[in-house]
Image (cartoon, grey):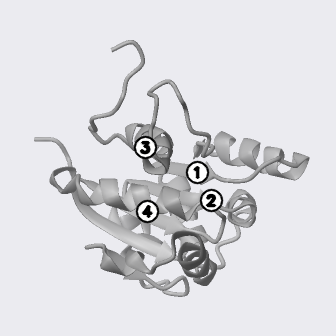
Amino acid sequence: MQQKHKIIVSITGASGSIYAKVLLDKLAGLSAQIEQVGIVMSPNAKDVWKHELGNEDYKNYPFTFYEPSNFYAPFASGSAKYNVMIVCPCSMGTLARIASGISNDLTTRAADVILKERRKLLLLVRDTPYSLIHINNMQTVTQAGAIVCPASPSFYSNPKTFEELVATVIDRALDLAGLDIKSYRWSE
C-alpha cells in the first residue's frame, strides 16, 4: 500500500493566486493519495487572491487552514511527519527568510522543519526579473535540499485556457512532490 502524503501548502502574497487555486483544485481531487493538507495563507495572499481572482473561494476548500502566527500547528514540528511542503506562489521575501533560516511565522517555521527533516520543499517562485539576491537565495535553498520550481508555464501541450496554462506548472510541482497525476507528457 502506498503511503499517503501529508502536505503543507503555503500561499504567500506574491502575484499568481491562480497558481494556488489550481494547486488546491488538484489536491482536492487527489484525496486517495493524501492523508492531510494544511494551508497557511498570509494576509497579503488573501488580498491578492481577492484582487486577482475576484473572490474568496479559498474558504471553500476541504482543508485545514492555520493562521500564520500559529506555531501550534502540527507541521511546526517534524514529529507530525508532514512529508511535502509547497509554497505557491512563493514571494521573494518568503524565499529570503527561508534561505536565511528566519522562522518568524508558520510558513518559514514549517519550511525550516521540512528542510531539517530532509523532506520535500517546493518553492514556486513567481517574480521576474530576478536580482542577484534572489538568485543567491535560490542557490542557498537548493543547496539545503529545496526545489525551486519557477512558475514558468510550458506551451507544448497547447493549453487553451489560463487554468490549463497554469496547470503545466502545478502538474510539474505535483510530480516533484511524488503524487501520481494524469498530465500531459512529452512525446507520449
Q: CA gap, disc 4 to disc 3? A: 12 Å
Residue wearing tag 4: 21
Residue wearing tag 3: 164
Q: CA gap, disc 2 to disc 1? A: 5 Å
Cβ–Cβ under 8 Å for marks 2 and 4:
no
**Residue 43, horizontal then vertical, whole percent:** 59, 84
* SS label for mark 1: strand
**Residue 38, horizontal then vertical, whole percent:** 37, 70
Cβ–Cβ under 8 Å for marks 1 and 4:
no
Residue wearing tag 1: 124
Near mark 2 (Cα within 10 A), the count class, few <14, some 14-19 or many ≥20, is: many
The mark nearer the N terminus, 1 or 4, is: 4
Cβ–Cβ under 8 Å for marks 2 and 1:
yes
Q: Quadrant of residue 59?
A: bottom left
Question: Which three-letter amino acid code belongs to the residue tagged 3?
Answer: Glu
Question: Which three-letter amino acid code belongs to the residue tagged 1?
Answer: Leu
Question: In the picture provided, is 69 more to the left or to the right than 9?
Answer: right
Between disc 4 and disc 3, the foreground one is 3
* SS label for mark 4: helix
The mark nearer the N terminus, 2 or 1, is: 2
**Residue 103, horizontal then vertical, whole percent:** 64, 73
Residue wearing tag 2: 90
Q: CA gap, disc 2 to disc 3? A: 20 Å
